[in-house]
Image (cartoon, rainbow, N blue to C red):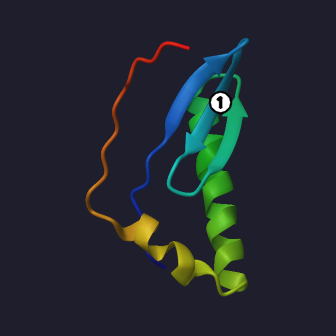
Amino acid sequence: MKKFNLTATIWEEEGIYVSKCPELGVASCGDTPKEALSNLKEAVELYLDNAKELGLIMDIETALTSSSKFTSIIEVTA
């Protein structure tokens, strides 16, 4: 079993914390940032288990194994 380092983004929406893994497009939520992160980890693990069962893990391997990951905050006007 391999271990992967993925990105988690968490933000607050109307009293609920939303969490998302941008590499996979998997999201979850929780009442606290810690709970949202824990729920996201579980959702990602289920997503990866399903991808393995369906033989799709190779399709997402680049996102899972990339050693270069960058995050940034940008300001836009809309």
Q: Residue furthest front?
A: 78
Residue positioned 57% across, 38% down in the render: 37
Residue positioned 58% across, 50% down in the render: 41
Say which quadrant the C terminus sits in.
Answer: top right
Residue positioned 26% across, 57% down in the render: 68
| Left or right placement of residue 4 versus residue 49 in this view | left
Vertical order, 58 against 8 (above or below): below
* Depth check, front residue: 74 or 12: 74
How crowded is the residue under tag 1: few (<14 C-alpha within 10 Å), some, or many (20+)? Answer: many
Say which element carries label 1.
strand
Residue positioned 43% across, 54% down in the render: 6
Residue 3 visible? The answer is no
Q: Quadrant of residue 4?
A: bottom left
The percent position of residue 74, horizontal first and vertical second, equals 38, 24
Q: Quadrant of residue 72?
A: top left
The percent position of residue 57, horizontal first and vertical second, equals 57, 79
The percent position of residue 27, horizontal first and vertical second, equals 66, 44
* Depth check, front residue: 63 or 30: 63
| Left or right placement of residue 42 versus residue 62 in this view | right
**Amino acid, disc 1:** Val
Vertical order, 23 against 54 (above or below): above
Residue underneath mark 1: 18
